[in-house]
Image (cartoon, rainbow, N blue to C red):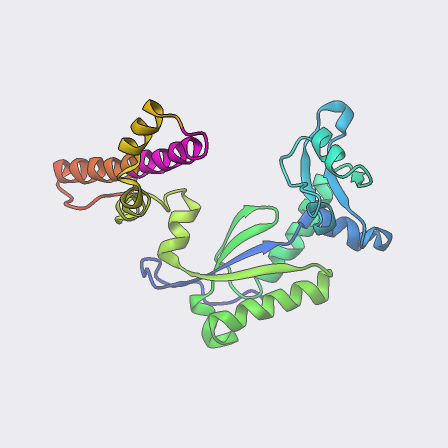
């Protein structure tokens, strides 16, 4: 039965969130249903002849550089002996529903990101199932035992999960400033060195200096972004940088 802890406050930033991601989901489902594929490079995706793309690749195919969203034609060149399987999205959705049923045995607070990935708020489930890390291990084992699939489980705080879900992780809270300083400070001398290199070409260091300058520019952009967020938030009366939509 689903976890009964439904009436829980949602404002506590210290709430514990599990991030669960199925490993090579589409390809793993195909291997499970057809054991003869195990140990062979498997690509789930469109045909190389019809400009298809890779929806998923198992770890044997990834060893050759194949990854999801890659053009199927390029994947075929990288791994010509791979077994290409047409996606069965409706079937994967059914398996995804079975996985979610397992999630809901531990908590009703499930935030799906895709068919093979979700966030679970397990804070209120701890009195029933133990610490959050143990809940993650239990869910992983249930998926393995009942569905013969493998999941990766991570534990994060709710405040971080919220930023990840809404695409705001690098916005506000000083992240721009800190990352900008990390990138910019080591390369403050890059422009002057680059100008000298242009005046007196040295092919051994010229390309390296361009890379240093690029890092410096990215760092400066991040610092300026933080400054703009600070200025905008103060004009709005909040006093601190705030995430943007």
Left or right for 50, reference 171: right
Residue shown at the point (43%, 68%) measured from the top left: 124
Quarter-of-image position of residue 244: top left
Quarter-of-image position of residue 61: top right
Please name whichever residue, 41 or 104, is drawn nearer the observer in this view of the structure: 41
In percent of width and height, residue 37 lies at 83, 50
Specify the quadrant that holds the C terminus: top left
Please name whichever residue, 152 or 177, is drawn nearer the observer in this view of the structure: 177
In percent of width and height, residue 91 lies at 73, 44
Left or right for 98, reference 79: left
Dominant secondary structure of the residues highlighted in magenta in the image: helix
In percent of width and height, residue 67 lies at 65, 41
Asked if residue 209 lies in the magenta stretch, the reply is: yes
In percent of width and height, residue 197 lies at 35, 28
Specify the quadrant that holds the N terminus: bottom right
Asked if residue 239 lies in the magenta stretch, the reply is: no
Bounds of the magenta segment: 202-219
Residue shown at the point (29%, 32%) measured from the top left: 191
Residue shown at the point (51%, 61%) measured from the top left: 154
């Amino acid at each position: 039965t689903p976890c009964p802890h439904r009436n829980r406050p949602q404002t506590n930033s210290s709430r514990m969130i599990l991030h669960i991601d199925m490993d090579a989901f589409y390809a793993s489902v195909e291997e499970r249903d057809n054991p003869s594929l195990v140990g062979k490079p498997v690509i789930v995706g469109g045909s190389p002849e019809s400009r298809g793309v890779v929806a998923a690749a198992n770890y044997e195919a990834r060893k050759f550089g194949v990854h999801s969203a890659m053009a199927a034609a390029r994947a075929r060149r990288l791994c010509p002996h791979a077994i290409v399987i047409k996606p069965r999205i409706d079937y994967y959705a059914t398996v995804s529903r079975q996985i979610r049923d397992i999630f809901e045995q531990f908590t009703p607070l499930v935030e799906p990101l895709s068919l093979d990935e979700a966030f679970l708020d397990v804070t209120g489930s701890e009195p029933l199932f133990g610490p959050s890390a143990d809940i993650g291990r239990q869910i992983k084992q249930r998926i393995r035992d009942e569905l013969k699939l493998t999941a990766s489980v991570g534990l994060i705080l709710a405040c971080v999960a919220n930023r990840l879900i809404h695409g705001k992780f690098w916005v506000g809270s000083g992240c721009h400033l800190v990352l900008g300083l990390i990138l910019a400070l080591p390369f403050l001398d890059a422009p002057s060195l680059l100008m000298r290199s242009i005046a007196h070409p040295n092919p051994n260091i010229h390309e390296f200096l361009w890379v240093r300058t690029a890092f410096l520019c990215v760092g400066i952009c991040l610092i300026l972004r933080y400054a703009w967020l600070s200025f905008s938030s103060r004009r709005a009366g909040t006093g601190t940088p705030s995430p943007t939509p």
